[in-house]
Image (spheres, rainbow, N blue to C red):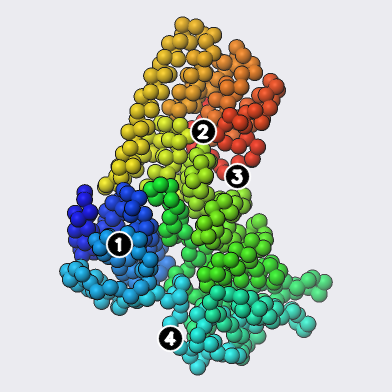
Amino acid sequence: MDKAQLISEVKELLGNAETEKALGRLTDFLRSSPEYKELYSLALQARARFRKAQQDEIQGLASSEQTKLSYNQATRQSLQVVEWLEAGNLKPDASFAEEARPARWPWVAGAVALVLLLAGGWYFRDSFRQGRPEGPQTTDCPIDDPFRATSRFNILLRPFQSVAGEGSPKPHITIATRLQDFIKGLEIDCDFGTMTDVDPNSFFSDADAEAAANTCRAHLIIWGTVEKPSPTDSFTIQTRYKFVKQDSFVKVYKLELAEGSEIVKVDALSIIPTGTTLTQSIFESIKLLFGLIAHETGDREKAIAMLEEYKPEPDDTTANLIKGMLLGDEYIARGQEDQAWEAYSQLLETHDYPLARNNRGVLNYKKGNFEEAAEDLSVFLEAKPDNAEALEIRGSAYLNAERLQNAREDLQKVQEMRAAPSPELNRKLKEVNTRIEQEEQAKASADAAVRANPNNLAAWNQKAVSSLKLGNYQEAVRAGEAILSRDRDNVDAFVQIIKAYRSAGDTARVEKTIRRAEEAGISRRQLDRLTPFSLFQTPTFRFPIKRKTEQ
């Protein structure tokens, strides 16, 4: 399909309110050539927004008005990308938050206008970041000093409630003092204020917090409690925060690869809530809070500094997710891919978060760690088995790791899922099919050779190599063991057995084989030089592959 046909078809689909199908056609076309890299990334963002709206609607996470708004925004983004494509603007420096251009297609504009009318209006410009409360601060806001009119990010602080009696600490004063110094260094104009007329005996709920923040036009509200269970116990501080946003989750990004292995970011569904309770010391809590504030206000340097310094408890899932995912996002935005890889890896040491798996898998692929990339993406695909982008990256990783049968399975599935497969996908499938035929022939020759001479070690080795590439791990192990029964310290045989067990997800037998090699006088370092993965680093991943080898 040429560009003119694609544009015509997408316009018609959008005009008929078939946004999901339109975005499928659009992304399939744009991924076909590196020249469309920027537009492809923007189209992926539009598709992610549309899918998130669908998910929110299904799970009841958003009101009907919010859902309609998200659908409308996705439609508008799609129209903008098509307009840029038609105009030949392949490197737009404008964002979707810009004012909409005059409609060039009256029939499309009419259809979209109808959708917008049903939704109750259109937001031509998103408020700051993730849904800034609109309108002036009301007179009902009980605050010591009104927020400045120029402030683009407002923080509302409620005095902490004490249930510990006289002499209890006042954490909000510590937070306010630190905030004053911290805000001076932010890249945008922030302000904060403290609520007054607070009843110390009244229960302050999440709903109360959101209502107070909306009344005061604040983006973030911080409150908490101070407790002391008994006279001999120390004070316990619980710090709560909540961002006032259109959705109820912290935005994080899913990494994908465009042509030429360029990393692109698309919005992803997140399980990280916009508010939670922090039970660590007030000084540790401040680090996370300030890291979040810097992230929300776009100050990457300070966000990284605060989040790196923050040390969450290992069992605090939410805090670990926030630190790991946001650090990864910030490092990717700065082009620091190695640091992003480290952030995701630290998170995965304690919490097996699928999106972190995907993102580290993409970075592993970019780094040339193809076995590790496939393993990470396999875990992600357990949660999202029909994610075509992750399947294609894993298929490419398998191809580069010479696990040909696995590569063909993934790439064929992607081809079936896509209405218009890219020339690059077709090239990969042709390559993998050719190489599978070659390995089948090599294996058949090796089989004939070992039948003629069972002591032909080279033929046994070829059989192990080809079996591994063709996905027959049991046969690869048996061929390697046949070599070791004739040559107990054969390094190549140990390597093939280790690779087969690793490919099958049998980490216990990987370690057992390494110990056997060491007993035969072969060091782990010798083996490590010959394997496409590290034998010194204990894997932080788990293996989802159900196939197991047998001895």
Circle 3 SS class: loop
What kind of residue is marked 3?
A: Thr
Tell whether label 4 touches label 3 (CB within 8 Å): no
Q: Which mark is residue 12?
A: none
Q: Earlier in the sequence, mark 1 or mark 2?
A: 1
Mark 1 or mark 4: whose residue is earlier in sequence: 1
Going from the N terminus, do you reach mark 4 or mark 2 first? 4
The residue where tag 1 is placed is 89
Please state which amino acid type lies under the numbered disc 4: Gly
Do labels 3 and 2 touch, CB within 8 Å?
no
In this picture, residue 256 sits left or right of residue 172: left
What residue sits 21% from the left and 69% below the top? Answer: 104
Mark 1 to mark 4: distance in Å? Answer: 35 Å
**Mark whose residue sits in front, 1 or 2:** 1
- Front residue of 185 and 452: 185
Where the C terminus falls, by quadrant? top right
The residue that mark 2 highlights is: 503
Q: Secondary structure at mark 4?
A: loop
Residue 163 sits in which quadrant? bottom right
* Mark positioned earlier in the residue sequence (3 or 1): 1
Task: Read off the residue under disc 3.
Answer: 540
Q: How many marks?
A: 4
Could you tell me if the residues under marks 1 and 2 are in contact, i.e. CB atoms within 8 Å?
no
Name the residue beneath numbered marker 4.
135
